[in-house]
Amino acid sequence: MRVKIGDLVFGSEEKKAINELMDNSTISEGARCKEFEAKFADFIGTKHCVVAANGTVTLMLLMYALRYHSAYKLKGGEKVITSPLTYIATSNAIVTTGYEPVYVDINLDDFSISAEQVKEYMENVDGPENHRAMMPVHLMGYPCDMDELNKTASKFNMAVIEDSAEAHGSLYKGKRTGAMGLAGSFSFYIAHNIQAGEFGAITTNDDELANICRKMKGNGRVCYCTVPDIENGKCPHQNLGFHPRYLHDVIGFNFKSMEYQPAIALLQLKVVDQILSKRRENVEYLNDALAPLNGTLKLPVRTEGISFLGYPMVLTDNSFSRNEISKQLTKAGIENRPIFNCIPTQQPAYSFLKKKYEGKLPNAELIGNNGFYVGCHQYLKHEELDHVAGTLKSILLK
């Protein structure tokens, strides 16, 4: 039996949606992308959604857009506070767009950046004016303390970019993640809560930011209208004396999407409540089944409104080895992953920061050494969940 971390099942509806695009020779960003933008913005509760090629580039677009936004006007070199425990794309997006990441430790219960420590850091750091943005990460679907983070950001005029790649639909005090900062960033990778492959989206209520991101993802072109809009005379830039899709007023990227991914994502969005409910049910099922391992494993906190990416566990008994557990799970056909690493001290790419942060991020290092997760996705059946629980108990109840 094989139990996957994530899965995407192509049924008749998915095949029909893809075949329609192929029959019409439709590939590049167009009607499906626009439809998804409207519906996903409505789902998250924001005015705008801007789709892009993947979740990493949505973060890059947002960080680069801060250079052009009238309220921020970043120049590069500014500092951005973020989580040390997450997929490396978060830090990469900060660094590759010309900023310096600053890491603050996490809370052990939900892997979120500590809002209390962020506040303390900003109130005591030399040069707080050089810290111009904050990128909290809603890891594994757990929302960060957005009220407190926003208070600190407001006090120091910092832009808040929510990395919500793993938290589609998670609620914080009745609001969706991705709707509480200046902008949110989402990834629809295969293992995530809504799956479409390589696909990403930005959510925001800020008109200026949305327009900048639309321009930037198309190599900085003046116009982000669709080709049909231009050809039908609906483009406001059509009288500039040059084709508006080939006139560029800023330096940008090619981060556009294709039509296939939103065609799949739209089908999942139709049943998103069922998807998120099933994932929560699977977490509850595993929590009950693994209750005898309390004391050896720290199981996920049961919180209402969480959109779980996976089923996260932390090894608390040092007589066992996480690596050995991982090997035995893999041997039993159960895909598993570490809960990432503490980026500045445990990721080789950021070894240049190791000395600066070593010993200063104890919670992130603990999870980086002892945390791991298995799947909880909506396609899993009880027999597969029983296989996961039975295998873990056979390993740890010796």
Image: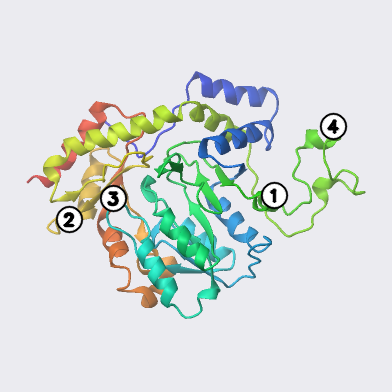
Farthest residue, direction left: 398
Q: CA distance from mark 1 to mark 2?
A: 47 Å
Of badges 2 and 3, nearer the viewer stands 2
Identify the mark nearer the N-term, 2 or 3. Answer: 2
Q: CA distance from mark 3 to mark 1?
A: 39 Å
Nearer to the camera, 323 or 138? 138
Identify the mark nearer the N-term, 3 or 1. Answer: 1
Dot 4 amino acid type: Asn
Tell me where residue 386 sits by quadrant. top left
**Disc 4 designates what residue?**
232
Residue at 70% across, 24% down = 24
Farthest residue, direction bottom: 126
Query: SS class of the residue under badge 1?
Result: helix
Identify the mark nearer the N-term, 1 or 4. Answer: 1
Q: CA distance from mark 2 to mark 3?
A: 12 Å
**Disc 3 designates what residue?**
372
Residue 89 visible? The answer is: yes
Q: Is residue 372 left or right of residue 265?
A: left
Query: Where is residue 191 drawn, in percent x and y?
Result: 41, 40
Q: CA distance from mark 1 to mark 4?
A: 21 Å
Identify the mark nearer the N-term, 4 or 2. Answer: 4
Query: SS class of the residue under badge 4?
Result: loop
Nearer to the camera, 109 or 370? 109
Dot 1 amino acid type: Asn
- Give residue 316's mark: 2
Query: Where is residue 181 drawn, in percent x and y?
Result: 52, 53
Identify the mark nearer the N-term, 3 or 4. Answer: 4
**Disc 1 designates what residue?**
211
Q: Is residue 200 left or right of residue 315?
A: right
Of badges 3 and 4, nearer the viewer stands 4
Dot 2 amino acid type: Thr
